[in-house]
Image (cartoon, rainbow, N blue to C red):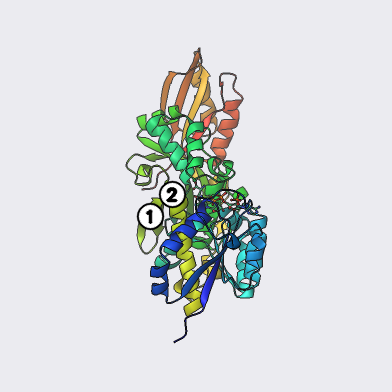
Amino acid sequence: MSEPLPLNIGLCGFGTVGQGVWKHLSANLAELESRLGAKLVLARASVRDLKKKRAIKVPAKALTDDPMSIATDPSIQIVCELMGGTTLARQVTLAALRRGAVVVSANKALICEHGPEIIATAQRHGGHFFFEASVAGGIPIIKALREGLVANRFPRIYGILNGTCNYILTQMEERDAPYAAVLAEAKRLGYAEADESLDVDGWDTAHKASVLTWLAHGVWVKTDQMIVEGISRITPADFKNAAMLGFGIKLLAIITRDFARNEISVRVHPTLLPEGNVVANVSGVFNAVSVTGDVVGTTFYSGRGAGQDATASAVISDIVDAAALLKHGKGAHLLGEVAASPRNRGRLAPPESIRSRYYLRLTVKDQPGVLARVASVMAKQQVSIASVIQSPADQPGAASLVLTTHESNERAMGATLRQLRALAAVLDQPVLLRIGDFE
Ligand code: NAP
Ligand code: HSE
């Protein structure tokens, strides 16, 4: 009997993720090939700098500094885009899809920005686009939404989607570690994006929230249609205050759908979570996703959200799916996108209408009448105060005021913040955090 034709794999990008894919795929090749009944060949990889030293050695003839030559190579059936960015990565992805190749991507920024074009190109040319590694690292959350939970509609999905931020927040909370030092450590460990502001300013989480929203609700949401706030203004004092109130702090993506009104809301912000909440107890580089389906109820997923091994695990799962598709034809993951079903489309709720309880930290002059002035601003906006803690601030003559509110909305809190900033007694930029009531 003749040997089956090999399936050639090309990696555009051979950094943290690319080298992890090469390492773990090589180590598990025989096992995967026997399960697939297909021969897999790691054929080529591209880098920017051919002279850079790499932990994983590959034959010199397999390396190129021209990723487009891999994307357009007709002998390569599976092209993995593992470079990052949205310009060259888009060109490489589209070029591979236009010739009917399968593209595997870990690039959530690209999917958020150019998802509709990529999916349309794949459909037009008979190519396929897989992206398990784009959200929540090693957690198979894309498969869970597409396949395992296909019977469901999703009133709520929320969770920690950025390993770097969760690592930083955990180290700050547990070790009182300085922000800059922990961020440098996250970079060294291969968790952070090349542009770290994507992580710490919440954009990476927003890109991932966009991918999940599309999968769950068939709507592409851009980051400028969401509330997106990062973690850079959170201080050790916020962790202490939150703990005093019975909360932890996590950077969350929150995607909700009110099916009665057919409204979807997507937001990313640091959130106070009750200490007993399972997501509040997920630490370090781990991600966690809570998915509530109308049929299944609430399900929960946790695992490493960033780093070489976890991400390689997700990319290899896509490579194997791609190989099974090329060898055996359609699989369950190709049932059609939720986007194709009009029943599933919803409209975006205006961000100002989002309701929540709030935590507000102010540094104010420690003088008579200041608390009354703050309370009066909040009362004017119909924001009802639930608790107040006053303690001495670092600056002489100043006090730290921590207020929590009963449920209010973004419009009222936005107006409250603007008026508080204008008070002479308010010394620093206020810190506003939302409280997550998910149970
Ligand atoms: P990385 O370590 O910076 O690797 C990027 C690779 O692409 C490098 O080999 C680099 O070449 C190459 N490259 C970058 N720009 C290029 C250009 N303009 N022309 C040619 N080659 C170029 O990044 P990474 O952490 O592996 O991330 C890759 C992708 O996976 C990104 O989309 C990222 O968001 C995503 N992702 C990363 C993780 C993670 O934990 N790291 C997790 C999930 C998803 P050189 O090596 O020569 O510089
Ligand atoms: N920088 C990302 C993170 C990589 O820290 O979560 C995984 O997508």
Which percent across, then down, holds residue 143?
A: 44, 64
Near mark 2 (Cα within 10 A), the count class, few <14, some 14-19 or many ≥20, is: many
Q: Nearer the viewer, residue 159 or 350?
A: 159
Residue drawn where x is 38% and y is 69% of the image: 31
- The residue at which mark 1 appears reads as 301
Tag in front: 2 or 1:
1
Query: For residue 169, which quarter of the picture?
Result: top left
Depicted 176 relative to depicted 286: above or below: above
> The disc labelled 1 sits on which kind of residue?
Tyr
Question: Circle 1 — which element?
Answer: strand
Residue 146 visible in the shown view? yes
Disc 2 + disc 1, Cβ < 8 Å = yes
Does residue 434 appear left or right of residue 411 in this picture?
left
Q: Nearer the viewer, residue 38 or 273?
A: 38
- The residue at which mark 2 appears reads as 159
> The disc labelled 2 sits on which kind of residue?
Gly
Residue 258 visible in the shown view? no
Q: Nearer the viewer, residue 383 or 125?
A: 125
Question: Circle 2 — which element?
Answer: strand
Ligand 2 within 8 Å of the CB at mark 1: no
